[in-house]
Image: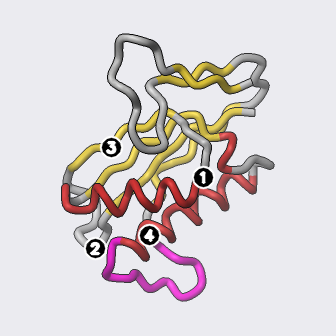
Amino acid sequence: MIRQLDPAGLPAATGNYTHGTEVTGATRTVFVSGQVPWADEDGKLPDDFESQCRITWDNIRKVLTEAGMDLENLVKITTFLSDRGHREANSRIREEVLGAHRPAVTIIICDIYSDAWLLEIDAIAMA
């Protein structure tokens, strides 16, 4: 069972994340390596953030599907953004992709391994 932890005394979590996630009764854990915006179909890398973000989420979904899980199994997400200017688009797309599901989330602004990548996302899922 996955339970969201949003204790009194902390500012309300805005957007689709929670301050903490408690998992009880889990029998499997999947650690998703940092996924980047490489699409399998053509190997091309789009220049715009929105396309890169959607491809990255699709790659996460593919890893989870291979494990017999889906995005609802995510309990922790860490997103690395190449530029602070991508924050709003990142949050909007994450909300679209996850819907009402609210895992624990960390966002870090940093250099990313390839200058062409505008983001990288790693995750933990449990079932």
Disc number for residue 116: 2
Left or right of 61: which side holds 85?
Answer: left
Disc number for residue 37: 4
Residue 89 rendering spot, x and y as whole percentages: 35, 63
Left or right of 4: which side holds 93?
Answer: left
Label whose residue precedes the other's in the sequence (4 or 2): 4
Residue 121 rendering spot, x and y as whole percentages: 43, 52
Classify residue 90 by image quadrant.
bottom left
Separation (CA) of disc 4 from disc 2: 9 Å
Label whose residue precedes the other's in the sequence (2 or 1): 1
The N terminus: image quadrant: top right
Left or right of 93: which side holds 75?
Answer: right
**Is 44 colored magenta in this rendering?**
yes
Residue tagged by mark 3?
107
Q: Considering the numbered disc 1 on the image, is that residue within a helix, a strand or a loop?
A: loop
Give the residue at the far top of this rendering: 9
Residue kind at label 2, given as amino acid type: Ala
Separation (CA) of disc 3 from disc 2: 19 Å
> Which span is picked out in magenta?
38-49
Disc number for residue 14: none
Label whose residue precedes the other's in the sequence (3 or 2): 3
Separation (CA) of disc 3 from disc 4: 17 Å
Which secondary structure class fits the magenta region best? loop
Residue kind at label 4, given as amino acid type: Pro
Residue tagged by mark 1?
99
